[in-house]
Image (cartoon, helix red, strand yellow):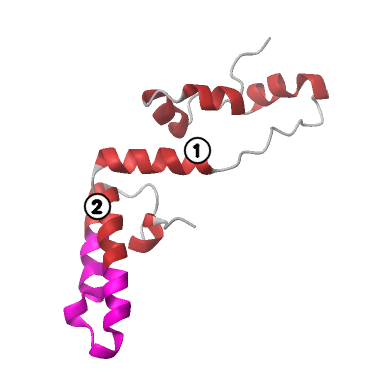
Amino acid sequence: MALDYYSVLNVKRKASDDEVKRAYKRQALIWHPDKNPASKQSEAEKKFKQISEAYEVLGDPRKRLIYDVEAIKSVQFPPPRPSSSCAPAAAPRCHQKHHNRQQHPDIVKLRVFGEEGFWVRVHPTSCN
């Protein structure tokens, strides 16, 4: 399983660049190999490498956006469930009507990156 950089730095996904930087500095001070006893040296080195890798990605806005988009693409989206007011044949239209996903920030990111085809297959945006 891939490493979740947000949990490594203990920040929320919507954290600002300053919050990410502060979290990195805090974690780096705690887990720096020179600041830990010899008995915890190998654990500290491993943790410090993870923290450095997480900050390298989350500290750069472009790498962070790519990381977020890849995380979205890796999620298995279930098909939309029809509500009680929707007939099975009308489920995509009903889903679109009740859950307008065109303005969702993740979709905007995907469209900026030219990955719109992925979302069109998962969440149809046109109602016929």
Q: Is residue 36 magenta?
A: yes
Quadrant position of residue 34: bottom left
Stretch in magenta: 22-48
Task: Report the disc number at residue 57.
Answer: none
| Label 1 neighbour load within 10 Å: few <14, some 14-19, many 20+ | some
| CA separation in Å, label 1 and label 2 | 21 Å
Task: Report the disc number at residue 56.
Answer: 2
Q: Whole-percent x and y of residue 56? A: 24, 52
When the figure is inspected, residue 62 is found, relative to residue 45, above or below; the finding is above
The kind of residue on which mark 1 rests is Lys
Give SS at disc 2.
Answer: helix
The kind of residue on which mark 2 rests is Glu
| 41 or 81: nearer the viewer | 41
When the figure is inspected, residue 91 is found, relative to residue 47, above or below; the finding is above
Residue at 39% x, 49% y: name it.
13
Q: Residue beneath label 1, please? A: 73
Q: Main secondary structure of the magenta part?
A: helix
- Of labels 1 and 2, earlier in sequence is 2
Q: Is residue 35 magenta?
A: yes
Q: The C terminus lies in which quarter of the figure? A: top right
Q: Whole-percent x and y of residue 19? A: 26, 54
| 92 or 99: nearer the viewer | 92
Residue at 42% x, 56% y: name it.
4
Quadrant position of residue 60: top left
Instruction: Report the side of 73 relative to 50 (left or right).
Output: right
